[in-house]
Image (spheres, rainbow, N blue to C red):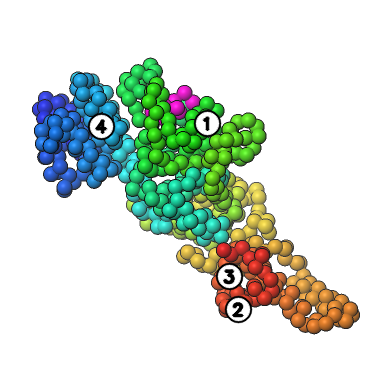
Amino acid sequence: MKPIWVIDDDQSIRWVLEKALTREQLPVCTFSNMREALDALEVEEPQVMVSDIRMPGGTTQNAGLELLQQVRRDHPSVPVIIMTAYSDLESAVAAFQGGAFEYLPKPFDITKAVDLIRRAVSESQREEAVAIETSTAAPEILGQASAMQDVFRAIGRLSQSNVTVLITGESGTGKELVARALHRHSPRRDAPFIALNTAAIPRDLLESELFGHERGAFTGAQTLRRGRFEQAENGTLFLDEIGDMPAELQTRLLRVLSDGTFYRVGGVSPIRANVRVIAATHQNLEERVKQGLFREDLFHRLNVIRLRLPSLRERREDIPLLAQHFLKVSARQLQVESKRLSMEALQALMTLPLPGNVRQLENLCHWLTVMAPGQVIEVKDLPPEVRDILGAAPASAESLPAPIEANGFAAAAPTVASAPAAVAPDVEDWVRSLEREAARLLAARSPEVMEQLTRKFEAAVIRTALHFTHGRRIEAAQKLGIGRNTITRKVQDLGLEASDSEI
């Protein structure tokens, strides 16, 4: 952990905080003025900065405010706690609105001061963990299935837009990852991304969490607090599980989306919000509107652009890629050698229902990294509850996975995974069907029988190959043993454009 910096020209304040933090086994460095702190910032960065407002070293009396501005500009991930005397309350509020994590009025209770610093440390470490996870993910979101490619295309099209987005999909499909990607590729990328799960906050605290509160607004509100809208200024606010938002807060959120202003709890002055809102839910909002549980006007405000994330059951061909990635991530976190799935174990995973989607698969891979005895994971190494599911529900023809031919796994025995029709028990049935169709056309004196049958045959084979590869023409051509230009020409000649899902 990096040290906590205390900047104050009052030696007694520095001494008290240094002793208290050292007693709590928190590393600390102290500075007597702004210039010393700025010189140190050129070579290292603190975990948290605690700075007085009034001290020497700046161009004005409030050197702490100047220091805050420079830290927010050059080191935006460092939380800054501003210390001030009660007489400097206006300056503290100004600093707070300018980006300070919190302010600490003097004289302060040392226990409360340490608790506040610990909270800032936790926030800083959480942001670091997110940054590390983001930087090590190679790419941001994994998926080769055509449904995920549609999501990637949508993110690309929205990259220069500030429009409100509604992300829908089952739990565990990666809605927050998509929201972060939308932010990261938007013009607001350098401003904060603030995420809030509206279902995880108690109903009576959610309003303050969203909009903040003034000092004295309610019992226990001893200081002014900025809400998530202010924290996300110029950036993106991600509201997860928006379908669970209480009715009274739906009204307040509608107001912000409509005119861009809001009030803190207990406040009388409107605050303008320059924030892009991305909302997400696993629920059917249209149905909740019909039931009177969600405001229709708010639904239309949120539903400007909708992105639906497919369940993992709709993109089973991505399971090998995802499993391999999660096993590597788990191994890296535990500093062990990465394990791999045997073909039988992988095929078994691809038949599971996985109601928890990608999150469930990730947790399963973490479990396997810790609990599987060998480097190659076999079916017998899977968790007991998974083996129970596999034993109780043998794979049907519809749930069998497609052959695996990439991502470090050997090819499986050929199994038809997503062919539109069941395989006939007699492999020669299709030949007899073809003979009967030829006889019918010949008896009817139909012209160009060979041409008709050839077109039908080619259309059926190409349509099935495209269905099998989810519309990817190059892959379909490779599987059929024909050229890319050939399949493109035949798709056009046979009128298959309408059924071809490739974009």
Nearer-the-camera pick, 150 or 156: 156
What residue is shown with label 1? 250
Mark 2, secondary structure of its residue:
helix
Q: Write the start and end of the magenta stretch as one range.
A: 203-213
Q: Which mark is residue 473?
A: 3
The disc, 3 or 2, on the residue closer to the chain's N-terminal end is 3
Mark 4, secondary structure of its residue:
helix
- Locate residue 296, reporting x and y percent: 60, 35
Q: Residue furthest right?
A: 443
What residue is shown with label 4? 95
Q: Is residue 478 above or below residue 172?
A: below
The disc, 3 or 4, on the residue closer to the chain's N-terminal end is 4
Q: Main secondary structure of the magenta part?
A: helix
The disc, 2 or 1, on the residue closer to the chain's N-terminal end is 1
Q: Is residue 2 above or below residue 226?
A: below
What residue is shown with label 2? 486
Instruction: Tell which tag, 4 or 2, sits nearer the viewer.
Output: 4
